[in-house]
Structures are given as structure tokens and as C-alpha cells.
Amino acid sequence: VGHHNARTSPPLVSLVFSTMAPPGAGAMALVSIPLVQGKAEEALALFKDHALGIKYTQSQKGALSFDFGIHTAEDGSQTMHIFEYWVEVADYAAYIAKRRDADLMKDWDPVFGVCVAGAPTIQWFPLTASYVN
């Protein structure tokens, strides 16, 4: 397979597909959290710096990789999206049960809660395929 753009790149002799998911990944989660206007940077900082943010998540059995993005809609509302990779679906199910334990999350929920504008959408499922250029 060849492709040539005379202005910017030499011809490609072949396309090589490799996985985008980290090695060992068998499950994914997509978490979407509507944010209070003006709280996106604070929300990201909390995930990065708070002991019950991403550090806690990464310490869980089966946790592999996490990508964060902020989407800003035309009306200015913002949503944090977290793409997560886990070893297996059961690992994520066990983790999310801990996140839903109010006593365990008593130091996280009030701090992060001021950034949240509505109920998060959480979906988790087996990893089916992964491609990267």
C-alpha cells in the first residue's frame, strides 16, 4: 500500500498496525463527567494531585492506562472524558464498587464534587480492537 504527498511526506511502502491499548489490556472504560463552568482545570489538578485521584486509581488491581480529555460544547459547557484501560472487566467492576463506597471516598467526594455539574456516565466493556497509525 502506498501513499504519496509530494509536499510533506515520502511514499509509504507499507502500513504497520500496532495496538494503541497497553499490553495486557482486555477491558476499557469510558467515564464522562459534566463539569461546573470554569472548573475544568481544578478537576484535572485534583485527579493529578489528590491521593484519591489518579494515584488511587492506578494502584488498583488491573489498572493500566488513563487518558483525560475536556470537551467544550458550543454553549460553553464542559465534560471531562476519561478513557481507561484495564486488564479485565472484573478489575474495573471491583474498582468502581470502591469508588461508590461513600465512606471510602469521604475525602474525595466533597472536594471533587464541587467540580461536577451532573451525574457521570460510566460504561465499561471488553476491549474488542485497537488501532494506531
Image (cartoon, rainbow, N blue to C red):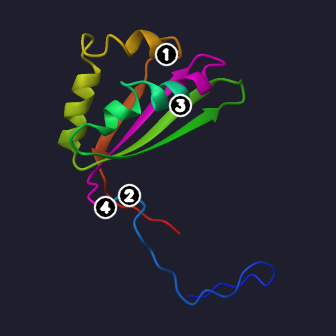
As measured in the structure, the alpha-carbon distance from the residue carrying label 2 to the one carrying label 1 is 29 Å
Q: Quadrant of residue 45?
A: top right
**What segment is highlighted magenta in the picture?**
23-43
Magenta-span inclusion, residue 67: no
Quickly name the residue at label 1: 118
Q: Which mark is residue 21?
A: 2
- The answer to which of marks 2 and 3 sits earlier in the sequence is 2
Quickly name the residue at label 4: 23
Q: Is residue 75 left or right of residue 125?
A: right
As measured in the structure, the alpha-carbon distance from the residue carrying label 4 to the one carrying label 1 is 34 Å
Quickly name the residue at label 3: 80
Q: Is residue 109 left or right of residue 69?
A: left
Residue at position x 53%, y 87% from top?
Answer: 14
- The answer to which of marks 3 and 4 sits earlier in the sequence is 4
Which quarter of the image is occupied by the N terminus? bottom right
As measured in the structure, the alpha-carbon distance from the residue carrying label 3 to the one carrying label 1 is 12 Å
- The answer to which of marks 2 and 1 sits earlier in the sequence is 2
The reply to whether discs 2 and 4 touch (Cβ–Cβ < 8 Å) is yes
Residue 80 percent across, percent down from the top left? 53, 31
The amino acid on which the numbered mark 1 sits, given as a three-letter code, is Gly
As measured in the structure, the alpha-carbon distance from the residue carrying label 3 to the one carrying label 4 is 25 Å
